[in-house]
Image (cartoon, coloured by chain):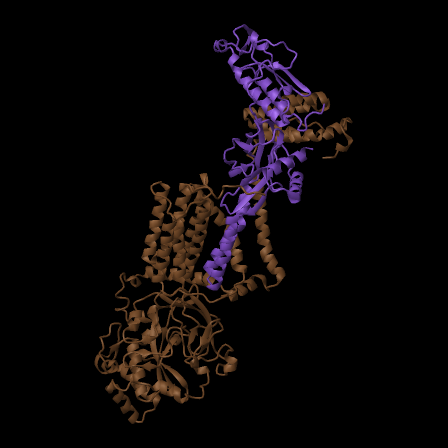
Amino acid sequence: MSEVSGQFRTLLPRESLLWVFAAQFVVLLPHFAHLPSWLIFAWFLAVLWRIEVFRGRRAVPGRAIKLLAVSLAVAGLALTYRRWFALEPMVALLAVSFTLKNIELLSRRDAVLSLMLAYFLAATLFVFEQTIPYALYGVLCLVVITAALVAQQGSGSARIGRALGLSVKILAQAVPVMLILFVVMPRLGPLWAVPNNTSAASTGISDSMSPGDFSRLSKSDKPALRISFDGSVPPPEQRYWRGLVYTHFDGRRWSEPGVTGNRWFGRRFRNTQSGQENDGRLPAVGPRYRYQVIQEASHNPWLFALAISDSDTRGVRSTGDDTLVYHMPVGSRLAYDVRSWPRESVTAGPGLSPAEERRHLQLPEEGNPQARAWAEARRREGMDSQAISQSLLALYNRSFTYTLKPPALGADTVDEFMFDTQQGFCEHFANSYVFTMRAAGVPARVVAGYQGGEWVEQEEYLLVRQYDAHAWAEIWLPERGWVRVDPTAAVAPERIRDGLQSAVTEEFMQDALLPLHKFNILNRLRLQWDMINYRWYQTVVSFDADRQQGLLKRWLGEISPLRMAMLLGVPVAVGLLGLLVWLNLSARGPALPPASRAYLRFCQRMARAGLPRRSGEAPGDFARRIERELPALGPMAARITVAYERAAYTDSKGALKQLRRLVRGFWPLRQLAKLGAAPAPHQSVGQ
Amino acid sequence: MLEKISFKAVSDNSEAGGLLQQRWLRWLNRRLPPASTVTLNHRKLFVLPTAAGMGFLLLIVLLWLLGTNYENNLVLALVFMLVGVFVILPVHTFANLSGLKLRLQEVEPAFAGDFGRAKIVLEKTGKRSHERVRLCWPPEEGALVDIIDSEPTEVTLELPLIRRGKVRAPRIRVESRFPAGLFKCWSWVDLDVEFLVYPQPRSAGPLPWGASVGEGDQEKTHSAGGDDFAGLKSYQAGDSLRHVAWKQFAGGRDLYSKEYASGSDARLWLDWDLLAGRELETRLSNLCAWVLEAERAQVAYGLRIPGQALAPAIGAAHRQKALTLLALFPVQGVSS
């Protein structure tokens, strides 16, 4: 059949227009941070233009102006974004389409299209951030856009309170559906490669280490990792979360030549997709830690785990240096499951290959002669690797200080630190230790990661913050393989045991704008907030296919079609039932006064006795008619009618009571049957 | 018989004809039989997504792809939320129309080529209000009303009329897209609207004074407003307002009409045979024009068509009688 014409073709009234702009603004606001400024300016200009058009001060832009606007926007995008296959250009493109659509926002159809774009843009917000504040803001976006959609109906719906109220009502009713689908809908995993958020600077531990890097990190109390254990928890002195291994030293900077961005040297990959069974190195039984790490976005590919670890999480691979990497930079919060075997439980491998040995003994041609000489001297004294390490650590212990504010170092960083300043942070110790050990001919490497963490009792997880960033060393002992040595522990054992804060009480977070960590209550509040965040990640953000299976198994016992159907069917049935009840209740008119209800019951019984009340017949007339046609019932009917009139018009409780009593005892069919004057045989049904 | 007419009327107003259409209408007639009062309920209402609703569905699919590809649970949650909205909206849209009572109040007669007007009273039967309800005879715009208070609301619908006679109006489309415009809920209601359509007035020259072939003697008194005041008679509906005795009415007495001697003596006959040689419909149109002109000139007139005759008189009641005769004149003519 033909459509109702004109519903879409009508010009937009003022309220509709303002609602669309409001929805656009709410959605664009958080994107202002990364959108180019010309685009924001263009959006405001387009809105102003459209308002001017509405007020009749300006004409709707002609074809030439529109063409100009489109080409300007395309040129702007092309100049702003070099790479098209990324997230920001996509968002910018959506924002541009908003802007261009605004100047020809004429019909209801345009408005609806614009609001659909707004929904999409609101969703892209979550690709950038998945924190609780953003989620709440997303809900606000949803409410405003839906309200704008409702307001497009015009008239009363466009009032602010009414539109928002309706929107909240609709969304609230959609929540149960959302919850069910969230739990039940299978997560398929990426269908094709998608562009990532590239603009964000990487945070945390970087791909190289030079003096000062880690003391910079120590100023940040942002969470880095949250680790929950399945089974035993390693003691504090074992909590070394290895992230990166640096083997190359250029005299000042330690780095890993193989790692540039997210590309690693293929040759160093251990083939782990098949697990430890093929590898043979990791035992199938024996002590091990099982845990899940939730890592904050670092925009780097490396992950953090105890030594020697393995992971079954998709996209996570192990490297030859016993670290874990992700297949792409971690652009948003990532959860991965890890199993770790303590080094002691793993039999050492066959020994270092010559290439590996070269790699772990590499030193610059010259520089730091004092340190080299010291190492040479130890060697000449006939010490073995372990003894050299011991004497070096003893040296640190004797005369070095651990501080967050070490003096600046010149060209020969190791020499100056070891023989001059003797004050430093973890990277200074790791740097000088590995250099000296290499100079003594012991294969050694710097390991960067996090050490320690704060145990959150209520939720049972370990919270590792950025200031837990740490650098330590590993040396190769032929009989034991790689052995962890933490030179910092020789100077400040409390750093390892109790964390940074107790090691450098005075200096800790000194530069912070507000020394919040000094107030106990604030610390507790911050911990509470982190717990809420942790819950949020655990339950919502990292709810993947595995967790879904786990949850469904926990609920249903086993996942069978019948049980799934029940899980889906029961809420649906309950929902439908509720809907029916609501539809029925709201379809009823206002409730009748009690006297009328009682009288209506009387009329129903009269109808059953074969004498229905005519529509519009006054109660008095009806009573007289009963008297006439069924004299047997006459007196009773008259009494009821009198009682009804009194109850209805005098508002007395006694009259109502009497009316009810009379009606309760009024059974016309029975009375007629007793008198043998039943009007029709088929109606003499017992009551 | 009635149904056949209603098919015709519908197919007059919507071009698409054909077998399918007829079956659909027959089904509708069974499901929603004509009645002057109709309360919309689940048996009478249909709900489907609009074009915007289909767009919304596409949006859901695209967002699901986004959420799945980025493995982003918040995007997926938003998608599921929108699915929830899409599931819950048809209920709202349905509830917005369900329980609405439509009652045909009045149908005004009209001339062919003009609009027929039907007054329809809308009323709610429950607590639910009915917003943004559009009533129309497609492709007409119709009326857009909100029924929020318990007071009945009256709307006037207009239908363009082409043919004279008794015209059954097609079904009225009652539609609402409230609250979000993503779904439309509608019904095709037959309120038993029947228009009495007079022929389209088409002038055939001046009134045929004296040309009548009738039996009356041809007096020359053609002024109905002659000065021979004959007396007062009590006012009857249909009497010309010009003849009302306003002075007496203003004095607090009942309404009276003045009677004029000359008025009753008029011998103007609007005769079918005067227009011999013209087509049947043209003749009716011409007669119609004469009737109107005679009324305007306040001249008593008689009407003579094959098989029927109307004695000379004047006034709204007489006019209506004459026009009704013309309107209902058989299409095939009278064979005699």
Colour seen for chain B: purple
Q: Is residue A127 left or right of residue B267?
A: left
**Occupied quadrant, residue B314:** top right
B189 and A684: which one is in front? B189
The quadrant in which the C terminus of chain A is found is: top right
Residue B29 at least partly seen: yes
Q: Is residue A287 above or below residue A101?
A: below
Colour seen for chain A: brown
Residue A284 at least partly seen: no
Locate residue A276, reporting x and y percent.
50, 79
A483 and A328: which one is in front? A328
Q: Is residue A65 above or below residue B144?
A: below
**Occupied quadrant, residue A243:** bottom left
The quadrant in which the N terminus of chain A is found is: top right
For image coordinates 28% across by 91% down, the residue present is: A376
A363 and A114: which one is in front? A114
Q: Is residue A572 left or right of residue A331?
A: right
Residue lying at the far front of the rendered structure: B277
Q: Is residue A629 above or below residue A246?
A: above
Q: Is residue B204 left or right of residue A287?
A: right
Q: Is residue A68 above or below residue B114?
A: below
Locate residue B235, reporting x and y percent.
56, 12
